Image: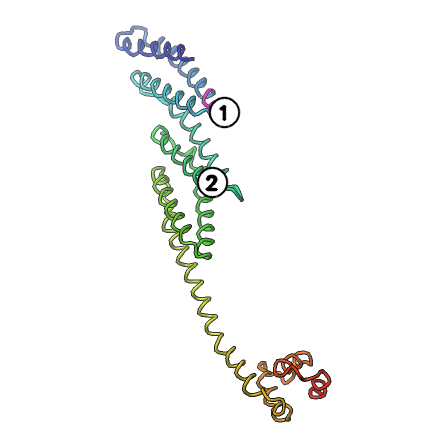
């Protein structure tokens, strides 16, 4: 408990004060190394338990104690890495939480991701070797890119300006946090590019639809102007002209069913028997 930690601090301080005058340096050094290894192991075990139990105050207290131990040990041989070992344990857990949040198909909370990434940045200076975290940090970064790209596509397609602005703002925060951990994802530019591409695609679709409209109007004009009259329609020449205009594929043939639909469009009063007679 607290009393044991205080006693340990005092013992460290005694060693620090008497180091230069200690005659049995070799023997003391062996004892110190053994004791320090045991303490580091115990601290790591306690830290893992605290992380698993999500007891933040306990984790912070252990990190603080490890820093004090490193200060004392650093004054002896300079090899002080207790806080580094604990920081790696905590940072790995925080990154794992962020990863699991991003893996959710529904109900993802971006605040959870950002909060845990920020927690890792506070530990980053205490970690000498970041290689142990590069794998999971890379996975989090890749998943973050994919999720945000999809979200921006959906927002841009729906014309949801409020959501696109919120995504860009979130990306800006993530970029700032990740940069401190040597991760340059450039999420902000990625999202802005994605939004522009989606907008350009929608504009191209609209232009394509506008180009089709004149042909449609032409066909409607043909129906109303050329074949409005049943009398003119019944003439053989008019039927031939109408057939050529409707046979856009140029196959020289038309099915009875399609022919009947065309005729009914022209004049609904025409009976099936009349259509059959004309077709024959």
Q: What is the x, y in percent for residue 116? A: 42, 34
Marks 2 and 1 close (CB-CB < 8 Å): no
Q: Identify the magenta region.
A: 46-53
238 relative to 10, above or below: below
The residue pinned by badge 1 equals 53
Magenta stretch containing residue 47, yes or no?
yes
**Residue drawn at (27%, 10%) of the image:** 17
Q: Quadrant of the C terminus?
A: bottom right
Pick the residue in front: 52 or 265. Answer: 265
Q: Is residue 93 left or right of residue 271?
A: left
Pick the residue in front: 33 or 159. Answer: 159
Q: What is the x, y in percent for residue 89? A: 44, 27
Spot the residue most to the front: 269
Q: What is the x, y in percent for residue 49? A: 49, 22
Spot the residue most to the left: 20
Q: Residues within 10 Å of mark 2 (few under 14, many from 20)?
A: few
**Residue drawn at (35%, 45%) of the image:** 172
The residue pinned by badge 2 equals 109
Q: Quadrant of the N terminus?
A: top left
For the stretch drawn in magenta, the main secondary structure is helix
> Which of marks 1 and 2 precedes in the sequence?
1
Between marks 2 and 1, how big is the CA–CA gap? 21 Å
**Residue 63 image-quadrant placement:** top left
**Which structural element holds mark 1?**
loop
Magenta stretch containing residue 185, yes or no?
no
């Amino acid at each position: 408990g607290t009393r044991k930690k205080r006693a340990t601090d005092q013992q460290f301080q005694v060693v620090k004060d008497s180091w230069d005058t200690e005659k049995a340096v070799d023997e003391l050094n062996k004892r110190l190394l053994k004791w320090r290894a045991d303490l580091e192991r115990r601290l790591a075990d306690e830290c893992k338990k605290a992380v698993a139990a999500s007891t933040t105050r306990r984790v912070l207290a252990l990190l603080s104690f490890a820093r004090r131990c490193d200060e004392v040990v650093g004054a002896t041989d300079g090899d002080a890495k207790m806080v580094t070992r604990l920081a790696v344990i905590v940072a790995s857990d925080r990154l794992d939480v962020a990863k699991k949040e991003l893996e959710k198909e529904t109900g993802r909370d971006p605040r959870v991701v950002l909060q845990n990434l920020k927690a890792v940045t506070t530990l980053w200076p205490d970690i000498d070797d970041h290689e142990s975290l590069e794998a999971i940090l890379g996975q989090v970064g890749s998943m973050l890119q994919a999720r945000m790209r999809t979200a921006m596509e959906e927002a841009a397609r729906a014309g949801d300006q409020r959501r696109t602005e919120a995504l860009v703002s979130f990306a800006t925060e993530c970029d700032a946090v990740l940069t401190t951990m040597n991760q340059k994802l450039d999420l902000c530019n990625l999202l802005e590019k994605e939004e522009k591409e989606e907008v350009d695609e929608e504009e191209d679709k609209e232009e394509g639809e506008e180009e089709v409209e004149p042909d449609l109007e032409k066909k409607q004009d043909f129906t109303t102007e050329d074949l409005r009259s049943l009398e003119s329609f019944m003439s053989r020449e008019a039927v031939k002209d109408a057939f050529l205009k409707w046979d856009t594929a140029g196959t020289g043939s038309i099915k009875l069913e399609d022919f009947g639909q065309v005729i009914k469009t022209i004049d609904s009063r025409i009976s099936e028997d009349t259509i059959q007679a004309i077709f024959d």
